Image (tube, rainbow, N blue to C red):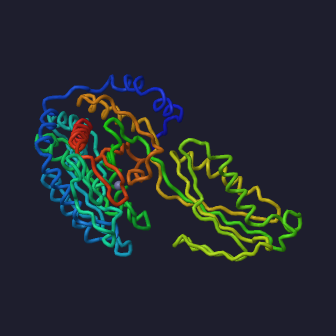
Amino acid sequence: MKKAILFTTILFSICIGANQTLNAQTSKVTTTLSKEEQKVMDYIDANMPSAIALLKESVDINSGTLNIEGVKKVGAIFAREFEKANFKTKWVPMPDSLRRAGHLVASIGFNNEVEKAATKPSSSKKKNEIAKTKKGKKLFLIGHLDTVFEPDMPANPFTMINDSTATGQGVTDMKGGDVVMIIALQALQAQGLLKDANIIAYLTGDEEHAGYPREVSRGDFIETAKQTEIALAFEGANGLNSVATARRGASGWLLNVKAKTGHSSGVFTPYAGYGAIYEAARIVNEFRVQLSTEKYLTFNPGVFIGGSEMNYDETKATGTAIGKTNIISPAVTVTGDLRFLTEEQKINARKKMQAIVDNSLAGTKATIEFQDGIPSMAPTEGNNKVLEVISGVTQAMGVGPTIAGDPGSRGAGDISYIAAYVDCIDGLGSSGRGAHAPGETINLKELPYLIKRAALTIYRLSR
Ligand SMILES: [Zn+2]
């Protein structure tokens, strides 16, 4: 487990300190380009037409999460491209019961040189080589093959809108991000810069709608990530000078209130009590009063059903209610989400909510259940160290330092499942607009820059 840095530190760096903090950060990192790095940049400029062609090829295959054949086809295209960069590829299948395609895994390095050396007496020359290899970090690159667009939705093939914008299903979320990752690796391989690298690229087939149980759909993903030290995820980039060092997690809650029923004329009296609707309203309002101003914490009631007779179907998120104005309601169900930046914040919020629930009005009894969803990617010292390296890269590229984006602006993502085990950065993919909506676009003007940023970041971290 990594230690979350103090909240005040985050606020400090976000609010006042862009320049101050970065000056301190970047003093240790290289802010100039080496000759090799310049060659990588030139390669990327020269190969932008093939990057766009790969983007078009992958976008024009529908890969909605539930379109198993489509997801596999996109996986095969990207596997072919990883192999061009000398990566070994494999497909991780999912059991039929999950109704998901599976995941593409591509890797280079990881030949256990270090372990072999530990058990075998070897020459000092060999030992030096290994020591050199050990300096580089083991990287875990994250992408996804699926999109939110299933085959029964209107098609939107890859189309240029103008010379710097294109549209298409998943064009930026995240086939654009996958292309950033792959072209960056091809550029490094073309310059012979992956010789000592240990990199695993993991492209899930169901990021938009992960299969249940999550222990199965994300089990191999988590175990594989544990073999590495730093995870870089290629979800959408937010400007040229920001990456995500934290993402909020998502969870749910289910509130059930039972109460004495009776004629409405007796409501508020000690013998009849307040009824379930007043009690549920009190609880939800008190959540808002006590917790709504806490930074990065949000909770939203999505369904609120009460009456004389009611039922709620959790699997379909639907319910019905029958009631009369002259009957005190005996039952209410409310469901909502709860988003948080750290486990500690989640646990504290749950404690406060539980205390509010327990403080029942007369004649009522409420219970609340909390359900875990996607963990958060908490801001940590380790994540900030990786940010420093990226900031050095963007300065070397002449676009200035990189800062941590607002964690409140991002939902949960695959990287969150492994944030407890490795240092993490997200937002290294392509830039665009309207993810998850028809007409989603990618910014092709920023694309070469983002591929270069990714390539140099991978290079500097892996050597
Ligand atoms: Zn995505």
In the picture provided, is 39 more to the left or to the right than 172? left
- Residue at the spot 78% in from the left edge and 66% down from the top edge: 275
Dividing the image into four quarters, tell me where ligand 1 lies. bottom left
Residue 285, image x, y percentages:
69, 53
Residue 278, image x, y percentages:
75, 62
Image label count? 0
Q: Looking at the image, is 13 positioned above or below residue 256?
A: above
**Residue 229 seen in the figure:** no
Residue 186, image x, y percentages:
15, 47
**Residue 350 seen in the figure:** yes
User: Which residue is farthest front?
Assistant: 162
Q: Nearer the viewer, residue 349 or 401?
A: 401
- Residue at the spot 18% in from the left edge and 33% down from the top edge: 128
Q: Nearer the viewer, residue 149 or 128?
A: 149
Q: Nearer the viewer, residue 184 or 16?
A: 16
Q: Quadrant of residue 326?
A: bottom right
Residue 272, image x, y percentages:
86, 68
Q: Looking at the image, is 6 positioned above or below residue 421?
A: above
- Residue at the spot 71% in from the left edge and 52% down from the top edge: 355
- Residue at the spot 50% in from the left edge and 54% down from the top edge: 250
Q: Nearer the viewer, residue 272 or 359?
A: 272
Image quarter in which the C terminus is found: top left
Q: Looking at the image, is 248 positioned above or below residue 21?
A: below
